Amino acid sequence: MTSTTSDTEAPGGLGWLLDDLVGKVPAARHAVLLSVDGLVLGRDGRVPVDAADHLAAAASGLASLARGAGRQFEIGGVRSTVVEYEGAYLLIADTGHRTCLAVLTGPDTDLGLLAYEAELMVTRVGDHLATGAR
């Protein structure tokens, strides 16, 4: 899969917001904004395009599984999904606009701070995160 946008270079792109998020959260490594079907809509400047594509695809799949479980067990919508790896965390936050925010961090990340900064970013850009139905 190849990214169709050069979001970190394009004027008005969202790369600067993702760079800001990664800069505010100690141990944050990468941040990607993705559509629910796994397309990269924005990425921080440190993550290579191919890695951003891979992260978006993985985050999309995990978010879809979480939404499916919520429907099956009638427990409501998903706000976020956290995967704890041996050496990292992956936070996937639903923005409510057919998009998700995926942030990959180191093992010593303050998850509360990460969730707070992610929510602030989503609130700041609001409707600019919307992805139309495909």
Image (tube, grey):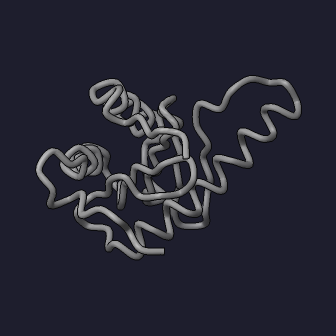
* Residue 86, position as x, y percentages in the image: 60, 66
**Residue ID at (46%, 33%):** 112
**Residue ID at (56%, 63%):** 57
The image quadrant of residue 2 is: bottom left
> Is residue 31 left or right of 84 when viewed as pictured?
left
* Residue 67, position as x, y percentages in the image: 71, 39
Q: Nearer the viewer, residue 53 or 21?
A: 53
Q: Is residue 20 above or below residue 58?
A: above
* Residue 13, position as x, y percentages in the image: 21, 49
Q: Which of 94 and 4 is in front in this view?
A: 4
Q: Is residue 119 above or below residue 81?
A: above
Residue furthest out toward the right? 73
Q: Which of 99 and 16 is in front in this view?
A: 99
Residue furthest out toward the front? 134
> Is residue 118 left or right of 5 when viewed as pictured?
right
- Disc count in the image? 0
**Residue ID at (45%, 45%):** 101
**Residue ID at (81%, 39%):** 69
* Residue 131, position as x, y percentages in the image: 44, 40
